Amino acid sequence: MQTVHLLGHVFPSILHVTLKDLPEADWIWQERNQKLHFSISITNSKIDVKCDLDNFESGDLVELHRRSFDLVRAAVDLVSFSKGIGLTVVLESIY
């Protein structure tokens, strides 16, 4: 099992968005016959998406970014809508 972290921020960061106890998500990537497990942490507008997968290749980054971004954006969009403020998600680095 390999782990990939995608890091980013919620902007404007001065709002210090923190979301606790976000649900984890599993996704089966059928084209690669691979199971992915995502867990998200957002603390003081800092995002850390942890993705566990069986076998990582550098060509997987686009799909991992796409799925991670969609999951984070869904959670942040709920906060944005409930508070009536505009928030933006940016995933900046992968390690």
Image (cartoon, grey):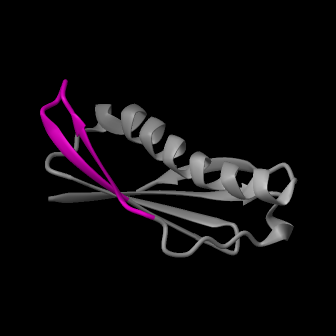
| Relative image position of residue 7 (x, y in whole percent) | 53, 58
Q: Main secondary structure of the magenta part?
A: strand
**In this rendering, position of residue 91 left or right of residue 4:** right
**In this rendering, position of residue 64 left or right of residue 33:** right
Please say whether residue 34 is one of the residues in the magenta stretch. Answer: yes
Q: Is residue 54 above or below residue 30?
A: below
Q: Give the residue at x 42% y 63%.
A: 23
In-front residue for pair 89/73: 73
Q: Give the residue at x 38% y 41%.
A: 64
Magenta part of the protein: which range? 23-38
Q: Give the residue at x 87% y 53%.
A: 84
| The N terminus lies in quadrant | bottom left
Give the residue at the far top of this rendering. Answer: 31
**In this rendering, position of residue 22 left or right of residue 37:** right
| Relative image position of residue 18 (x, y in whole percent) | 66, 73
Q: Quadrant of residue 50?
A: bottom left
Give the residue at the far front of this rendering. Answer: 82
Please say whether residue 29 is one of the residues in the magenta stretch. Answer: yes
| Relative image position of residue 76 (x, y in whole percent) | 66, 54
Q: Quadrant of residue 79?
A: bottom right
Q: Is residue 62 above or below residue 36?
A: above
